[in-house]
Amino acid sequence: MTELDLVIKGRVLIGNEMQTICIGIEDGKITVLGKDLDGDKFLDYSKYLIMPGGIDIHTHMRDPGFTDKEDFHTGTMAAAFGGTTTIMDMPNTRPMVTNVSQLKDKLDIIGKKANVDYGLYASLTPDSDIKVLKELAVGFKLFMAETTSAVPISEEDIRNKLADPELEGQVVSVHAESPERFRDIEVTSLDTHDDSRPASAEIIAVENITQMKTSAIMHFAHLTDLMSFEKAFGYSNEITPHHMFLSTSSDLGARGRVNPPLRNIREQASLFTAFVKAQVGIIASDHAPHTMDEKKMPFGEAPSGLPGVETRLPMMLALVQSEQVSLRLVQATCCHNPARLFSLSKGQIDVGFDADLSIFDMTKNTKIKGERLHSKCGWTPFEDYNAIFPDHVFLRGRKIISDGKLIESGTGRNIV
Ligand code: DOR
Ligand code: ZN
């Protein structure tokens, strides 16, 4: 038998059981798992937890157009430091990605800056040419309501577009908020922002979409209300850490302004419970950085969105360590289910999968500090929350983070 390129030994969840095993890697793929393996290079992390690299299917890396907030280098570096090795980027950059030339330009601009693997969404608009876009885009984003730099499309147009047979098997991620349910009130606080875009707008939007005919794989992004889950039964769904951990009672002011809005503390608690009970498919960050200067503006003028790509997985691991949730659930919602939705051979420590691995010392619980994170925006809504960050991160068998430092940049590839 030929010698393996690399063998990494550590604690891996196999089924329901933690086992210390060797992961054999060749050409960036996991080729064998075993108790004892030899390789050209052998890395012993026997005391550490090895997880599949995280997959964050909902980020806004702001490149091109808004690189004062983030760029593809800083955003994907933040992902890597948080143990996430694949991200998918939303199309509300400038210009908005609605046609193939915009998508190609964006791929050219960001390609060399990527520190983790990536896929780009295209925006679904009345004139998007799905046949050509789907060759290059990881999926489509549907904005039903106005939100930061995004142009919504009407429900009539959505119905027509979703019926296009070219969408067969394509993932359509839906920002489900129906503007008819919005209230034209003055928005001065988290509570009034919530009142202006109430959960009922989300519920009705989900209901309307589920009644439309389509051969696409419909995915509901950032759901906030349990009733939406009932309406979306049988469809792919996602929630965010901010809707799970923060509420209108949080002391964040405009930093907590986001669409869909944070809900009241009771709804937040029920969302967390739904997650614990394994009723949630995917956890995605909806990383949407804005500068602190923008967030310091009066509430009504501050842009919506908050950062989270670096903290998503580390916060989940802190929940595992405090025994609030199982590692199995975290791996399902942050790695396997996202990979399955997009049919990627990632998100799992098994033969044939990419050797994307994040390695954690589970005794190293720390407090999140905005100033230590790597997003260009320089702040976090989760200041002082518990988290466990990875010590080492591998992307297709190449070490990109070592002892908390980025040691190789620009290694990310387009997954499409
Ligand atoms: O709050 C939000 N911010 N919601 C979105 O849908 C877009 C995002 C952004 O890009 O800032
Ligand atoms: Zn978003």
Image (cartoon, rainbow, N blue to C red):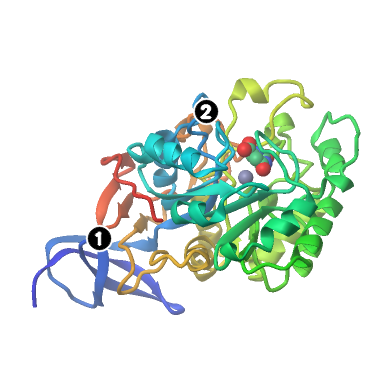
Is residue 403 left or right of 152 when viewed as pictured? left
The yes-or-no answer for disc 1 within 8 Å of ligand 2 is: no
Image position of 130 with respect to 291: above or below? below
- Look at mark 1 in the image and give the residue it sits on: 28
**Quadrant assignment, res 220:** bottom right
Quadrant, the N terminus: bottom left
Q: Residue at x 34, y 47 (%)?
A: 412
Q: Element under label 1?
A: loop
Image position of 283 with respect to 288: above or below? below
Visible residue check, residue 115: yes
* Three-letter code, disc 1: Gly
Front position in the image: 71 or 169: 169
Q: Element under label 2?
A: loop
- Look at mark 2 in the image and give the residue it sits on: 65
Q: Residue at x 72, y 68 (%)?
A: 213
Residue 316 spot, x, y in % from top left? 54, 56
Is residue 291 left or right of 43 when viewed as pictured? right
* Three-letter code, disc 2: Gly
Residue 197 spot, x, y in % from top left? 83, 43
**Quadrant assignment, res 319:** bottom right
